[in-house]
Image (tube, grey):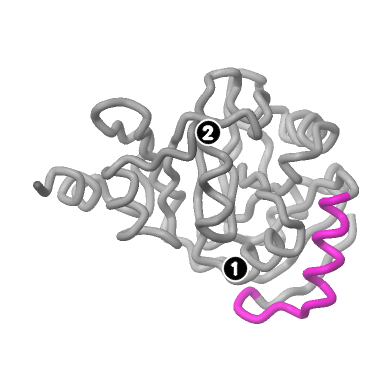
Amino acid sequence: MKIYKVTQSSPDPSVITELADLLKSGSVIAYPTDTFYGLGADISNQFALERLYTIKKRMPNKPIIILISDMMMLRPLIADGYLSETAKKLIDRFWPGPLTLVFRASDLVPAVLTANTGKIGIRLPDSELCKLIIDKLKHPITATSANISGDNSTNNPAEVEESMGNSIDALADGGITNYRGASTVVDITGEQPVILREGAIPFALINELITVQ
């Protein structure tokens, strides 16, 4: 595993290029997000996605969240490119940030990431590092936590190195992340939004926004 020292707010462009090239070649990397450290793979690379599940020891019936770098990247990933009024409200208020929205996936999203549910969790992170990597790659990347399934998520690169070891190809060491907990996950595929996980954004804030007439 190669370790890259990075500054989360203003990373070296040459490091961004190297990390994007690694992802493009099918590598799996660990990197800091605005919440915890994540495991990144290019979602267009089937080989990399299979490696990711193996490395994480994740069951195939467990979907994986993905990150985008801007709103232009969102619509091709969701069925019919349709954004409900609820989705627009939540996006306007909480993106970029620690909110994952679950949409109906388009055909561009590999079925393995949806665990064959036809749904995909997508987030626009409040992280310059993440957005620059994704921009350079020109594809979304996975954002499952950088740990073996069942273990605790971490905001500490030393713990990622200890846990992942040489099973991954690279670690972007940006120091401790300024996390406020995991992202809150909201399924907006039905008539009524369903909070699947309460995280950094409290249930009360979500509920207040989506119930306003």
Magenta-colored segment: predominant secondary structure: helix
Residue beneath disc 1: 176
Q: Could you tell me residue 55's position as x and y percent?
A: 78, 35
97 relative to 78, above or below: below
List x then y, in percent, for residue 159: 68, 55
Residue drawn at (69%, 63%), measured in percent from left and top? 135
Secondary structure under tag 1 reads loop
User: Given the image, on which type of amino acid does mark 1 rest?
Assistant: Ile
Residue 184 location, x and y as percent? 39, 46
Q: Which mark is residue 196?
A: none
Q: What is the quadrant of residue 131 in the picture?
A: bottom right
Q: Are marks 2 and 1 in contact (CB under 8 Å)?
A: no
Residue 83, x across and y down, in percent:
38, 42
Query: In which quarter of the view is residue 36 placed?
Result: bottom right
Q: Which residues are magenta?
A: 8-24
Please determine whether, in this image, residue 133 is positioned above or below residue 185: below
- Point 82% across, 72% down: residue: 15
Q: Residue furthest left?
A: 213
| 33 sits left or right of 58 in the view | left
Distance (Cα) linking label 2 and label 1: 28 Å
Judging depth in this view, the residue of 87 and 126 nearest the camera is 87
The residue that disc 2 covers is: 120
13 is within the stretch colored magenta: yes
Q: Residue furthest front?
A: 80
Mark count = 2
Pointer 2 or 1: first along the chain: 2
> Would you say residue 133 sits in the magenta stretch?
no
Q: Residue at x 27, y 50 (%)?
A: 202
Q: Amino acid at mark 2?
A: Ile
> Looking at this view, is 29 or 164 the one in front?
29
Neighbour tally class for label 2: few under 14, some 14-19, many 20 plus, Cα within 10 Å: many
